[in-house]
Amino acid sequence: MTTTRITDAILLRSVPYKESDVILSFYTSQYGRVSAYARGARNSRRRFSGGLTLLTIGKAELHTSKPDSLWRLSDYDVNVDHTNIASNLDAMIHASYAIEIVRELTPLEHPDTLIFDLLVEFFESLSIHGAVFSVLRSFELRFLSYSGFAPTFDRCVQCDTLITTECDVLFDITAGGIVCCGDTQNGLLLSEVARQFLISVQQKRSFSEVNEIPMSHRSKEGSLCRQIMLSIIQQHIGKPLRSVEFIHKMTSKSEDSLHRSHG
Ligand SMILES: [Zn+2]
């Protein structure tokens, strides 16, 4: 027996399949992350009148016949279209990174409205403000918190002492927090400026508030914050992120061409 489900959905990924189909990845408000195929989507534009464009938010009509099978998309009615993100390379890089985190760390068909609303708010922020360093850190921290992996920056995860020192402290990646005592095999040095930045970002509950917390992504402190957040996320995923490898390739390529043009 086939069950029909209609839900709000964000289109995260689209991969060609066979001659004319596509396999899609949605994050839906009612069923969490869902994989579905759209039959004939590549042959006929009329088949899905609003198109199947990444980062759109719409009403999806989905059908499933047995548990754990691929769902079938029969209709997708787009309400919000953030296609301007695709024309801004930095914003697109932030979007791809966020999508990869969600795809790697959320189970299939496990609804979580906090994650759904987080994605809606994040893509809206990218569409309006473009790529903002502190907003991406906030996305990481809120996602980790909603997933039950919130890192601890204000106290020691071993002895629970509130950290008040202005010296550098050790962040233990495996323990997910600051460690002021004992042995740490997997520690990264976190400066006081970077630690205070991460604490203030973590306290904010909306991206519009985070927008006003200044930090340059080119600064030493900024790159420290990025390195810590990336290490925490990779620790949970258990492998390198493809979107991050892509950024490294892009950056080294543009640096190469810069060196060449300077002789
Ligand atoms: Zn301690």
Image (cartoon, rainbow, N blue to C red):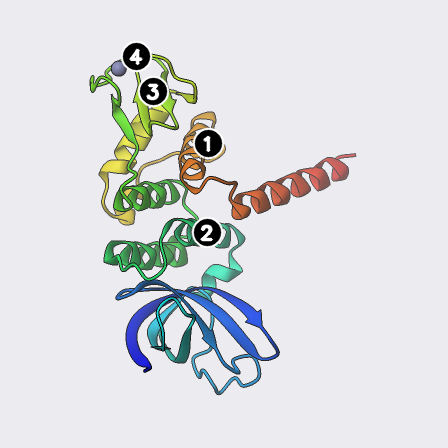
How many marks overall?
4
Q: Could you tell me the amino acid type at mark 3?
A: Glu
Task: Classify residue 188 by image quadrant.
Answer: top left
Helix, strand or loop at label 4? It is loop
Q: Is residue 158 left or right of residue 227?
A: left
Q: What's the CA distance linking mark 3 and mark 1?
A: 15 Å
Mark 1 surroundings: few (<14), some (14-19) or many (≥20) residues within 10 A? few
Disc nearer the start of the sequence (4/1): 4
| Residue where numbered disc 2 is placed | 100
Q: What's the CA distance linking mark 2 and mark 3?
A: 30 Å
Figure check: 70 above or below 101: below
Q: Nearer the viewer, mark 4 or mark 1?
A: 4
Q: State the mark number for residue 245.
A: none
Disc nearer the start of the sequence (1/2): 2
Q: Nearer the viewer, mark 3 or mark 4?
A: 4
Q: Quadrant of ligand 1?
A: top left
Q: What's the CA distance linking mark 4 and mark 1?
A: 22 Å
User: What residue sits 75% from the left and 39% below the top?
Assistant: 261
Q: State the mark number for residue 192.
A: 3
Q: State the mark number for residue 181.
A: 4
Marks 1 and 2 close (CB-CB < 8 Å): no
User: What residue sits 27% from the left and 29% below the top?
Assistant: 152
Helix, strand or loop at label 3? It is helix
Disc nearer the start of the sequence (2/3): 2
Q: Could you tell me the amino acid type at mark 2?
A: Glu
Looking at the picture, how far across and down is residue 71, in whole percent?
A: 40, 73
Q: Is residue 187 left or right of residue 258?
A: left
Please tell me which residue lies in front, 170 or 167: 170
Disc nearer the start of the sequence (3/4): 4
Please tell me which residue lies in front, 70 or 123: 70
